[in-house]
Image (cartoon, grey):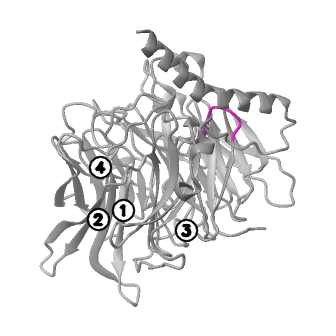
Amino acid sequence: MMRRTALALLVLCLWVLPFAAITLSIMASDGSATKAIPNGLLYPLVPESEQFIRYRPADYSAPVAHVEIPQHPFMAANPGSNMHCDAYMSDAYEASGPVGSNPEVVSKTQGFGGYGTVAFDSAGRLVGVYGNARDFQIELMAPYTLGELGSYDLPPRPWSRLFGGVRPWKYIGAGMYFYLDEQDRAVVPTTVNTVQIVQVPGPGRGEEFELVREYDLSGHVVPDTEDSVAWVLPDWGGDYYWYATTQGIVGTVEIESSAVRTLRLEGELIENSFAVGEEGVFIISDRAMYRFSQDGDGDITVDWRTEYDPGSQAKPGHITRGSGTSVTLAGGTDGLVVIADNAEPRINLLLLERSDGTIVCSTPVFEEGKSGTDLTTIGFEHANSEGNGTGIYSVIVENNWGHHSFPFSQPVPGLTRVDVTRHDDGTYTCGEVWTSDEMSVGGFRLSFGNGLVYIYDKQGSFVNTKWYFTALDFATGDAVYRKMTGTGQGYNNWQGSLFLHPDGGAAYSTTIFGLVMLRDGIYP
């Protein structure tokens, strides 16, 4: 008993002491300097040979020909307007991510807290919403130093919600899913169920944010619950915002008049971000996949509804029962919708016709009894040399099943690529291309520019965990290189998202103590 107690105290010290140093440095700082996330106390024991590992030449590149993802006219330029890159939620970037050439790691912290979404404004600067479970703010950051260029305070999380039973890492409101619009304005759902439109300052105009407008949706959520407006995206026509709440309300907000229309999905919850297409929005609940449209006056129509297997309960490591994937649109308006179900003993990757919701392919993924995803999928249609669709789609999904106890994540393998082929007679076949035993702990991303899939993974013991950016070959799933970002729980991604700079050469990951960047070469 004494030995176990002593071991527990040792582990606690190894985890807490570096963070105590963070707190002291921040208290002594005037706020002008960027503070790096400290490493665990055992960092010097990591040999250089484990800090950067290359499996392929530094000039390895295999760009992926794909059907161009449409630019939403009222969102910031593709890719990089929201957590999942674009309106189709493709999780894929046009630019080449870092290839591991003279790799450098830069990090920043201001104590416990991280960034749900990092977007990129028209000047290539980072715009993120930082939160620490209680306080939230929009931050403008320099892309290659992570230095803060300005900030804007958002409403804090009410104490009633903080102690209402929803753990901080399971709270998905408060701007985690904000987006940047075509005017470099952050459109942010807040903790008090409003939507704030906040202008990001342009270069040379002074680093001050401006609240342009605020929409009050507090009367348009499920009453007497801890309902949260978590997702807001613009209609393709630009006259309305679509929003969804965790308790199953779907709504439209007329931008000019602020008029709100809603539809309640009775007995259903929403956990995941939705996609916007030219013909409507695609929203997944814990029971069914939907396509909604509005009639020009904001009134909502259910175009189609397709049920899936929600499973009997939330799987280990998941926030709720039901699908854990955001919605991904692949191809054009005649293309597919990509989601996963929550079936046992293995989840199924589901491909649906975008036009009517018909399931055209279903394939099980991952190991029986240890199969689940709670983040997203990467999905797109391959293109020929003219840029036209080939009818072949690729989807990558990662396994997020695991008995996690914050802040110690216990991921299981792996990642799987599935290809789907549309035949001349309109039928489809789908099959697994590769499965990797890598253990990704964050929202992964694909670079069309170089054909690399970027994941954030962990290795080593729970006492001194090593965290890596790892690049995989999209074609084979094999590792191309690994670069250690740091050791200790400060570098823990905890199922946060990865982001690639649209100019290329840099990747970012949120952590539970800030933000970390991997970049090639030397930037100004």
Foreground pick, 493 / 6? 6
Q: Is the magenta region chiefly helix, strand or loop?
A: loop
Mark 3 neighbour density, 10 Å: few (under 14) some (14–19) many (20 or more): many
| Residue topped by disc 1 | 329
Can residue 135 be seen in this snapshot? no
Gap between marks 4 and 1 measured at Cα: 13 Å
User: Which residues make up the magenta segment?
Assistant: 109-115
Give the amino acid type for the residue marked by disc 2 in the picture. Answer: Leu
* Amino acid under disc 3: Gly
Residue at left 36%, top 62%?
A: 329
- Amino acid at dot 4: Tyr
Inspect the magenta stretch and tell me whether residue 468 lies in it: no
Residue 303: x and y in percent read 28, 54
- Location of residue 311 (image quadrant): top left
Q: Which mark is residue 290?
A: 4
Q: Amino acid at mark 1?
A: Leu
Name the secondary structure under disc 3.
loop
Distance between mark 4 and mark 3 Cα atoms: 33 Å
Name the residue beneath numbered marker 2. 336
Q: CA distance from mark 3 to mark 1?
A: 22 Å
Q: Position of residue 104 (x, y in %)?
A: 66, 60
Residue 352: quarter of image: bottom left
For residue 97, the mark is 3
User: Which residue is located at x 60 percent, y 62 percent?
Assistant: 76
Q: Quadrant of the C terminus?
A: bottom right
Residue at 75% across / 42% down in the picture? 35
